[in-house]
Amino acid sequence: MTETLHTPPQSAAAPAAAGAPGTPAAPRKLKRSIGVGGGTLLTLSCVTPASTLFVVVPDLFSTLGTATTLTIAIGALLCVGVAFCYSELGTLIPSAGGEYAMVSTMAGRLAGWLVFVLSLLVVMIVPPVIAMGTADYLAPLVRIEPAYAGAGVMLLATLAGLLDLRANAWITGIFLVLEVVAAAVVAVLGFAHAERGAGSLVDLSVASGSGDGTKTVTAMLIVSGLAIALFVTQGFSTAVYLSEEMENPRRNVARTVLLTLGISAVVLLVPVAAITLGAPDLAALTGGDIGAMVTAWSSSGVGTFISLCVALAIINAGIVMVIQNSRVLFASARDKAWPEPVNAVLSRLGGRFGSPWVATLLVGVPGAALCFVNLDTLYGVTGVSVTGMYLLVAVAALLARRGSHGAAPAWRMPLWPGIPVVLIAVLAYVLSQQEARYLLWTGGIVAVATVYWACYLRPRTATRWLVTVPE
């Protein structure tokens, strides 16, 4: 196991003690300011069901057709087991480091470092990719190039991320209401204009490339699509990044993780099923133009309303993802992952709002720049990264009851160790079915990270990569 630093609760004398001559400064801690309600709003906003529905799901429709609902449902079922692992580990290790703090503590430093690299891949790639989708849904009002629209969303999200979490919980909560309304309207319209029966949800058909025929979706294609299906519901893990800022994390982390997964699965699956049933034909479903289907089911006014709701949902997702990602970067610096000058800069907190402002800027501004890069293959890299990250989290959950951790007060998952064992087997198989180029891209990045570990972090085990877990 890695060496883990436990920071005691702050007292009135703590600031003076920390500044006393010859006394090493304690690791910086984030302020606890949110409960289950605020945590759920922020976490649901990161799942961002509406932007996922309108930006990511159309790609699944194009490859999986009527099997999209089934694939997402299987992914959500797998995520229940993953959520159990996150809930138990998140209450044992309530750190802003999230997955890497949990895995480092349970499975060792190298495993934790690799999880950090995988999570950093996910959190750096996803926001700009989602943000670029804003242009399509602003089209009823104004035409903007996707790159410029995405960059604008990322910069706006960065400014919002500099505020404290309580303010952001209100901002994202308002936007989340609009997301749910948009998803509900799509669901009602789809079911009201159903062209086929419920049996089509397991019909497993997709339009052929020529557009004048159909082909059957194979089981292997569904397994391959599970990586993206895991990605579309993966936002529930944001709760563990916020655990350091949650009041009573031993109770509230598990509640937030499980509540978020349940709500997001319903908000996503119901409209997907409605679209599958209501699409005028298989070619339209495979085309994935949800906005056009909504307009055909109703009117251009309703289509414009839905488009604007989706645009706000994407902005909402950008805000929460910047918040989440900055916490990961802040925690890595606090845990001494980098040379000391870099750690000192990244771990700075704002005086008024207490947010990690340098880390926030270093997440948001490069994210805006990434909007001008061709990111076509990055969905595949993200799917591989999410699957690999979940696999290592499941391994950590399998080890979570060894030694002193077994007696520690925490939320405990049912059916342990069966759930982690099944997850490890299934996720390893899903990973093996991904396209070679995505595996190679991700594997190359992991290899470079391993070299950094071997050359810099491992020789400095007493002073580098020391995971901080606040009491």
Image (cartoon, helix red, strand yellow):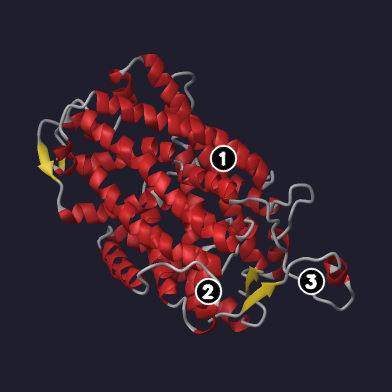
Residue 253 in which image quadrant: bottom right
Q: Amino acid at mark 1?
A: Met
Residue at mark 1: 154
Q: Between 149 and 157, which is closer to the camera in this rendering?
A: 157
* Secondary structure category for the residue under label 2: helix
Cα separation, mark 3 vs mark 2, equals 23 Å
Is 144 left, or right, of 430 in this rendering? right
User: Which mark's residue is nearer the viewer, 3 or 1?
Assistant: 3
* Secondary structure category for the residue under label 3: loop
Q: Amino acid at mark 3?
A: Ala
> Of callouts 3 and 1, which one flags the residue occurring earlier in the amino acid sequence?
3
Cα separation, mark 2 vs mark 1, equals 30 Å
Is 28 left, or right, of 291 in this rendering? right
**Going 42% across and 25% down the picture, which residue do you hit?**
306
For label 3, the crowd category at 10 Å Cα-Cα, with few meaning under 14, some 14 to 19 and many 20 or more, is few
Residue 220 spot, x, y in % from top left:
18, 56
Q: Which mark is residue 25?
A: 3
Residue at mark 2: 104
Residue 400 spot, x, y in % from top left:
47, 76
- Can the viewer see residue 134 in this picture? no
Q: Between 195 and 247, which is closer to the camera in this rendering?
A: 247
Residue 185 in which image quadrant: top left
